[in-house]
Image (cartoon, grey):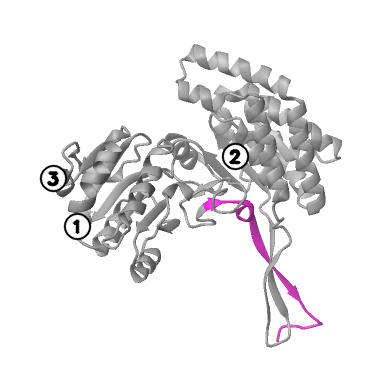
Amino acid sequence: MNISEKIRVIARDARQASLAIAQLPATVKNDLLVKMAAALETAAAVLIAENTKDLEAGRQKGLSAALLDRLMLDEKRIRGISDSLREVAALPDPVGEVTRMWKRPNELMVGKMRIPLGTIGIIYESRPNVTADAAALCLKAGNAVILRGGSEAIHSNLAIAGVLQNVLAEKGIPPAALSLIPFTEREAVLEMLKQEEFIDLIIPRGGESLIRFVVENSRIPVIKHYKGVCHIFVDQSADLDKAAAIIVNSKTQRPGVCNALETLLIHKDVAAEFIPRIAKTLTMLGVELRGDDVFCRYAPTATPATEEDWYAEYLELILSCRVVDNIDAAIDHINRYCSLHTESIITSDYSRAQRFIREVNSSCVMVNASTRFSDGGQLGLGAEIGISTTKLHSFGPMGLEDLTTTKFIVYGDGQVRE
């Protein structure tokens, strides 16, 4: 068989396996994940050996130190992956939950019950831990999963998937419930995106170019976010000590992630007091500041911002900064330039905090907190399959519940429609 035919067989078998995984009780799924966690730790030496092949190939290709670090597995990281599986096992199972129930005038009882989505395709880059994390979340939510990792991690991903599939087989569950595309050619991704007969949802995880490629070529619904242009607005009533700490954390803790701060908005009434202070702190931390005319007047180290800066996701130590007249201007700026990811207001005024929450359109809106908390684990979802900045069928960080949908259930006692 050629690649196209093999991908179709993988998708078909995953669809069939999804029927089995959807019927598993929570206790069986939890036991499965716990055994998978133990099996990964037992296989640590094998996983590290396979990962070494990817690291060597990456060095030969000239991958950056940062990418090689994302790719690397050692015993500590494998324990971390195993712990993540155990954490997913400990989460409440959403499958079968009845979320609403109401009585109609004819005495019919109507409700909505959570059910698995079916078969989910995950397309991702670099990090081998995603292989286990995504598989665990999909399986716990009663879905089959088809994984297609980046070519730079092919040996690591195949090894991890192999360990997990062995556990499925030992438990009498079709290993096709967790499939990994073994081909590194781009053709494999294109063929996967054509399998709308068998795959219900595609979730891409990676850079903007990967996500746009998936969206442009998929026949299957895609959960996506292109980038994270996250904002903080410092209101005139803000506690400036809190504001400084939150801004520093949001921008500098991990500047290369999608929930890092990219644009800072400051109310004009606190500009003279706050800008010199925060500019000095950020500059000492290596942050390049790009500001509007007013910001640059108070921050001599800043350079003038351009229109493109307001749209930019830098993913590095660069921050665009603007002084605004009031909360109306802040909200207008955010709703114009944001990517619907995460925004935060620093304020002591309850009414302005509530207005910011109501009127900002992004998927995660915060009050007096770092944008870095926009993460499934940090928000109490236990783990995260991805972030959606589209409003169908999920909006924001996605956990177990977002890997399910609902169906109507109806209880009657002989009713017929007149």
The residue pinned by badge 2 equals 122
Residue at 27% of width from left, 58% of height from top? Answer: 330
Type of amino acid at the residue the image marks with label 3 = Arg
Q: What is the quadrant of residue 172 in the picture?
A: top right
**Residue range corresponding to the magenta coloring:** 397-418
Q: Secondary structure at mark 1?
A: helix
Instruction: Say whether residue 403 is magenta.
Output: yes
Q: Residues within 10 Å of mark 2 (few under 14, many from 20)?
A: many
Q: CA distance from mark 1 to mark 3?
A: 12 Å
Q: Secondary structure at mark 3?
A: helix
Could you tell me if residue 5 is visible in this image?
no
Judge depth for marks 3 and 2 and give the one in front: 3
Q: Is residue 305 above or below residue 391?
A: above
Q: Earlier in the sequence, mark 3 or mark 2?
A: 2
Image position of 333 (left or right of 373): left
Q: What is the quadrant of the C terminus in the image?
A: bottom right
Residues at marks 2 and 1 touching, judged by CB atoms closer than 8 Å: no
- Checking the image for residue 186, the label placed there is none
Q: Is residue 85 above or below residue 235?
A: above
- Checking the image for residue 268, the label placed there is 1
The residue pinned by badge 3 equals 297
Q: What is the quadrant of the N terminus in the image?
A: top right
Q: Earlier in the sequence, mark 2 or mark 1?
A: 2
Q: Earlier in the sequence, mark 1 or mark 3?
A: 1
